């Protein structure tokens, strides 16, 4: 169990006790509890790993990426982080999101995440300022599917790709229109396509 989920369990336990729920019932529920879709979810776990998570704030990224590094990258491997920031939302967090990613990732790919009517490139530039503050570089790829493909293509044995910001959500907003999106299925389709291509070659 991750450190931040231990905090979540402790908080849930305390609230339930305050509400009068017995310890026996609480502990029984905790034993059978499953994390919701898109939270610390490994969607591929073979020669490299792919994780999806809904983290979309500086603190959430810090908790997630630092725990991923501790758990999966103790000796070797790279953390490849693919993410963006939502448009028409709190823009002040973008710089810090970039800084946190740069401090905890080895490779960073910035991409779309519901940019709405904002300029996607400006959003990524704002995130990029935080990345550059830590003297790290990044790649910007407009379409999320292309960014994920790039991450998977470059992944080597022992690496872990972390995709944040979308997770369980079923659409991507570009401009004023919502487009169907499924992060888990996208990863699976890309990996299947690449393996088929490699077999043919």
Image: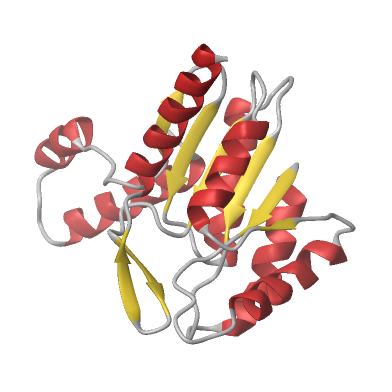
**Residue ranking furthest to the front:** 200
Residue 126, x across and y down, in percent: 71, 77
Q: Is residue 36 left or right of residue 89?
A: left
Q: Count how many numbered circles sit on residues in the image.
A: 0
Q: Is residue 14 left or right of residue 142?
A: left
The residue drawn where x is 63% and y is 58% is 141
The residue drawn where x is 45% and y is 20% is 196
The residue drawn where x is 57% and y is 64% is 84
The residue closer to the viewer here, 109 or 201, is 201
The residue drawn where x is 75% and y is 41% is 106
Q: Is residue 134 visible?
A: yes
Residue 140, x across and y down, in percent: 69, 60
Q: Is residue 32 left or right of residue 71?
A: left
The residue closer to the viewer here, 103 or 158, is 158
Question: In which quadrant of the rendered image does the C terminus lie?
Answer: top right
Is 141 above or below relative to 32? below
State how the image is colored.
secondary structure
Q: Is residue 66 visible?
A: no
Question: In which quadrant of the rendered image does the N terminus lie?
Answer: top left
Is 49 above or below relative to 22? above
**Residue ranking furthest to the right:** 135
Is 12 above or below relative to 35? below
Residue 74, x across and y down, in percent: 69, 24
The residue closer to the viewer here, 101 or 88, is 88
Q: Determine the image quadrant of residue 91.
A: bottom right
Residue 188, x across and y down, in percent: 38, 33
């Amino acid at each position: 169990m991750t450190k931040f989920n231990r905090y979540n369990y402790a908080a849930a336990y305390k609230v339930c006790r305050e509400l009068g729920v017995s310890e026996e019932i609480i502990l029984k529920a905790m034993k059978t509890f499953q994390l919701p879709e898109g939270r610390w979810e490994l969607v591929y776990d073979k020669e490299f790993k792919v994780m999806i998570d809904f983290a979309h704030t500086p603190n959430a990224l810090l908790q997630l990426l630092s725990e991923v590094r501790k758990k999966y990258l103790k000796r070797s491997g790279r953390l490849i982080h693919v993410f963006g920031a939502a448009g028409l939302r709190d823009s002040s967090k973008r710089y810090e999101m970039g800084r946190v990613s740069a401090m905890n990732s080895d490779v960073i790919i910035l991409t779309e995440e519901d940019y709405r009517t904002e300029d996607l490139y400006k959003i990524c530039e704002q995130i990029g300022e935080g990345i550059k503050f830590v003297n790290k570089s990044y790649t910007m790829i407009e379409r999320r599917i292309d960014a994920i493909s790039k991450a998977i293509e470059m992944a080597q044995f022992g690496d872990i790709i972390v995709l944040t910001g979308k997770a369980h959500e079923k659409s991507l907003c570009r401009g004023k229109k919502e487009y169907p999106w499924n992060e888990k299925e996208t990863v699976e389709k890309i990996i299947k396509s690449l393996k088929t291509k490699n077999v043919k070659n």
